[in-house]
Amino acid sequence: MAFQLGEHGSSIVTAARRAFGYRRGPAMTRGRLITIEGVDGAGKSTLAAGIVTALASRGIEVTSLREPGSVQTAERIRALVKDPGARIAARSEALLYAAARAQLVQEALEPLLVRGRLVLLDRFVDSSLAYQGAGRRLGIAAVRAVNEFATGGLAPDRTLLLVLDPATARARSASRDLPPDRLEQGGDEFFERIAAAYDQLAASEPDRFRRLDASRRPDLVLADALAAIDDLL
Ligand code: TMP
């Protein structure tokens, strides 16, 4: 069923009401939230652009957003957390991502979903669970709790996990002309912990997650992704 909130089983509208005092109207339409996850360099941006183009050619409108960012306050937090010169403790980092997320939920996601929109989101709570919970060793449960507060319990209808071994992903990131940002400066073990956490998250919620082999050509990854969201369109 659309709009399920993972383990809680309540709808997004219920979550929105709980978090933001939303009232449910009789003719309330319901949107869909699809997220893309994976380690840096796995090809999320390429996939997101491919999905938008493919759906547009079928006359399906989709709003494409990214995390952290997409609304002004969150974009400012994005600049801070990615700044290689910023000194940010692990707990501060988790809270900054959660703050950006809370702003995105309230300002964009929740209104879009209540209006019945299809939203494609590049990273969401699972990124914090993997990067801060496992990568920074803050613990999945602690980071999950912070994010429950930030999002009011909003969970994706489907999550596309781009699976690529961390070494290949890092080589891909390094081949871009840009210097590594603050997160990309993490070592091999940091990214191995992140990749392992993603695997565990996907295994623990098989209904929500679809694993896509991201070592293949982008058009093949896109074809799999489209098949993996077809029931939601
Ligand atoms: P990206 O948009 O280029 O993937 O950059 C976002 C960076 O922030 C990326 O290195 C992953 C990291 N990140 C976290 O560590 N936690 C989060 O919750 C999110 C959304 C991203």
Image: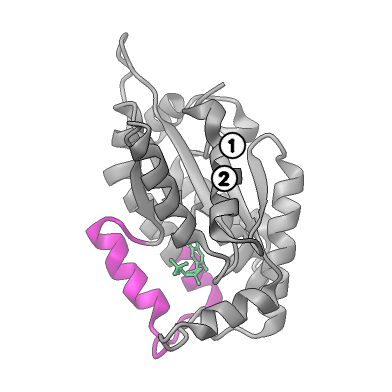
Observer-nearest of 93 and 66: 66
**Separation (CA) of disc 1 from disc 2:** 6 Å
Observer-nearest of 33 and 169: 169
Pointer 1 with pointer 2, Cβ within 8 A? yes
Q: Which mark is residue 227?
A: 1
Observer-nearest of 229 and 188: 229
Q: Secondary structure at mark 2?
A: helix
Q: Is residue 210 visible?
A: yes
Observer-nearest of 167 and 69: 167
Count residues near mark 2 (Cα–Cα under 10 Å), then give few for <14, some for 14-19, many for 20+: some
Q: Secondary structure at mark 1?
A: helix
Give the left or right position of residue 9, taking residue 2 as reference: right
Give the left or right position of residue 5, taking residue 78 as reference: right
User: Does the magenta run of residues contain 80?
Assistant: yes
Residue 117's image quarter? top left
Above or below residue 11? Residue 146 is below
Residue stretch rendered in magenta on the structure:
69-95
- Image x and y of residue 125, in percent: 53, 52
User: Does the magenta run of residues contain 79?
Assistant: yes
* Residue depicted at 32% across the width and 75% down the height: 79
Cβ of mark 2 under 8 Å from ligand 1: the answer is: no
- Magenta stretch, main secondary structure class: helix
Q: Disc 2 marks which amino acid?
A: Ala
Above or below residue 104? Residue 94 is below
- Image x and y of residue 229, in percent: 54, 35
Q: Disc 1 marks which amino acid?
A: Ala
Return the residue found at the far left: 72
The image quadrant where one finds the N terminus is: top right
- Image x and y of residue 134, in percent: 68, 67
Circle 2 is placed at which residue position?
223
- Image x and y of residue 152, in percent: 45, 40
